[in-house]
Image (cartoon, helix red, strand yellow):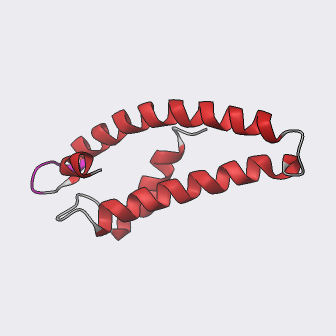
């Protein structure tokens, strides 16, 4: 993650470039994540978790996006993102997972 966080520093890049980088990351990650979700859903379709599968997948997506944003705000020095960007960041991120 340290290599990726470099691209989200305000001293190096603009917000626009950070979103372009985020776009590239999400394209790769979402493809793999969706494949995992399909496997997860197929595996648990015959278990007691069957009724809650979609809810569990949504909860995981929420935690992943929130954690990534928190990492970029709290752990990246001079991040292009601050706490006020959360809503836009979250809406932008969701587009890749649905």
Q: Which residues are magenta?
A: 11-15
Residue that appears at 24% across and 50% down: 15
Residue drawn where x is 61% and y is 54% of the image: 60
Q: Locate residue 68: give its quadrant.
A: bottom left
What percent of the width, then of the height, locates residue 31? 52, 30
Of residues 26 and 40, the one nearer the viewer is: 40
Closest to the observer, 64 or 18: 64
Answer above or below: position of 65 versus 44. below
**Viewport quadrant of the C terminus:** top right
Verify whether residue 72 appears in magenta: no
Give the answer, above or below, for where 69 lies relative to 49.
below
Residue 71 lies in what quarter of the image?
A: bottom left
Outermost residue to the left: 11
Q: Which of the two residues, 22 or 56, is positioned nearer the viewer here?
A: 56
x then y, percent, for residue 20: 29, 37
Q: Quadrant of residue 41?
A: top right
**Up-down relation of residue 88 to residue 82 (above or below):** above
At 81% from the left edge and 42% from the top edge, which residue is drawn?
A: 44
Q: What secondary structure predominates along the stretch shown in magenta?
A: loop
Q: Position of residue 24 (x, y in %)?
A: 35, 33
How many labels, in total?
0
> Where is residue 4 shown, x and y percent of the image?
26, 46
40 sits to left or right of 94: right
Residue at (48% x, 61% y) in the render: 66
């Amino acid at each position: 993650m340290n290599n990726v966080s470099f691209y989200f520093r305000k001293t190096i890049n603009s917000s626009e470039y950070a979103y372009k980088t985020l776009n590239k990351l999400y394209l790769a990650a979402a493809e793999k994540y969706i494949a995992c979700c399909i496997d997860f859903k197929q595996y648990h379709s015959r278990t007691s978790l069957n009724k809650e599968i979609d809810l569990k997948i949504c909860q995981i997506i929420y935690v992943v996006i929130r954690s990534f944003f928190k990492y970029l705000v709290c752990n990246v020095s001079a991040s292009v993102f601050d706490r006020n960007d959360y809503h836009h960041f979250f809406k932008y991120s969701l587009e890749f997972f649905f």
